[in-house]
Image (cartoon, rainbow, N blue to C red):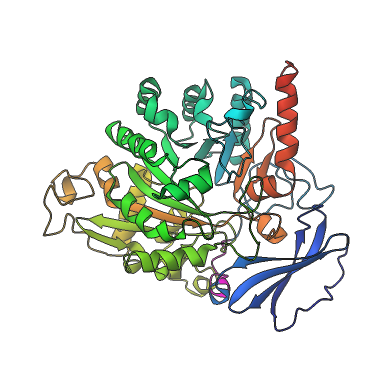
Amino acid sequence: MQWPKIAFRPKYDVVIEETQSICPQCKTLIPALLVEREGKVIMHKRCPEHGEFEALVYGDAAMFQRVAPFNKPGVPPNELTTKVEKGCPWDCGICPEHRQHLCLGIIEVNSACNLDCPLCLADALGPSRAGQGFELTYEQVNFILDRFVITEGQPEVVQFSGGEPSLHPRILEFIALAQAKGISYVMLNTNGIRIARDDRFLEGLAKLKPHIYLQFDGFDPETSLRLRGRADLLETKLKALDRLAEADVRVVLVAAIEYGVNEHEIGRIVEFGIRHPAVFGVSFQSAFRAQRHLPADPLQRITTPDILKAMEGQTSGLLRLSDFVPIPCCSPTCGVATYAMLTGERVIPIPRLVPVEMYLDYITNRSMPSLDQALLYLLERLWSSGAKVGSDQATAFVFEALSRARVPVRMPDPNWTAERCTSCRVGLPISQHQPRDLGRHVFMISVRDFMDPYNFDVKDIHKCCVGVLLPDGRSVPFCAYNSVGYREQVTAQLTRQQLSGGRHVR
């Protein structure tokens, strides 16, 4: 289908590019413009039936242009699942129009939750709707994992999510199953309530050692109330973290940042994560307007540059905007990350030590035949949506990258004492550290900005490397799954199967 040239040109806007999006109401594919307005990037689009829509895409237009070269050529999956019939974004599965394999596969094992969060990308069913949703069977999860292995060859990262996946009676078996299939980095995406309360569940986690992706939006009771529907969750989350530290299970804090709610807590979350022995990274995610969300103007939202600038200001420059480099396996505006070395009281982002930007700028580095290819490989593995945060492998990559860049590693620092070191506390020279001790000297911070029906951009979907893995063998790009209608279709189908008492067919 040929799309007509866009006729509208909002006054005073500078056109950056033309693209395609969807109508937020009817989900029809429509043309769209990305424009620069007052230093920000805005999407402007018009549906023939429902009129014009605008949404903030990126809070800093200069940064939007600057990160464009951080766009790694896509690597296709080993096997495609669907054909092109209707065109993107209607044939996800993955279809031949997709430009990238999956770095991270997500399996939503249930739709039930023990919270009724006002903000929920899965539109999970809280206690008031118990028994109305679905739970995947062991056979379904086994099939999903087998398909993931076939399409990816050697998938390295899978995340079990929900709903609240810890409520599934077989979740520990699912984690063990994924590990048995050779997936070395298995994540559990959880609110932490069961971890804080259930000793036997904690014992199971301690034995399997998955990595915990822990919902952690801030410290203020008002933040918890507005985003999670309860003001009293902080104590539970802190208890869960302390128990995970005792069990030697590693954690990434995941903070949803909502405009006007908790952007003032960004720096405190980072500083807390650096100090806590269970925490090896923080992932900030901009709140988006898909599924269940707070009422908001699409032009008033938090984007990646806003989070980075808040972090710089709130940590007094401990971490700076310039320390973060785009994740190049997806669209470079989808996310940024950095790794910091922790040594005593010091926090040193490795982009200050290693020329990360030069290597991951895929326009500049084409003209540099002397590029250290081994260092490029290491940095691409670290700056990936499938990065194994807190793992021994990621730690080894960081130290090898420092070595190849000829950065001397002197840790602990001269002022180290057992009481002051917030990293490993082993009190040994770096040469005598075990891999598990070295990991405590490496901390990762990422910022992700997911799309919704208001700022949905088809070209970014083409390169999405985070996908939801489904019982029928398909893998749907995360933002398409939440914005276009796939989630509603799949949830309705799985729920009908469960409520009817029938077999869960693929």
For the point 15% across and 58% down, which residue is it?
413
In the rendered picture of this protein, how many numbered marks are placed on residues?
Answer: 0
Give how far across and how far down residue 163 sits, in percent.
58, 34
Between 404 and 21, the residue placed more toward the observer is 21
For the point 29% across and 59% down, which residue is it?
403
Q: Quadrant of residue 316?
A: bottom left
**Left or right: where does residue 225 sit relative to residue 43?**
left
Give how far across and how far down residue 103 sits, in percent.
55, 47
**Left or right: where does residue 102 sit relative to residue 358?**
right
Quadrant (top left/top right/bottom left/bottom right) for the C terminus: top right
Compared to residue 390, the image places residue 3 above or below, namely below
For the point 59% across and 25% down, which residue is it?
142
Give how far across and how far down residue 327 sits, in percent.
51, 59
**Left or right: where does residue 106 sit relative to residue 250?**
right
Examine the structure image and report whether residue 284 is included in the region drawn in magenta.
no
Name the magenta segment's main secondary structure: loop
Q: Is residue 374 visible?
A: no
Compared to residue 302, the image places residue 76 above or below, namely above
Compared to residue 20, the image places residue 139 above or below, namely above
For the point 61% across and 79% down, which residue is it?
38
Magenta span of residues: 64-72
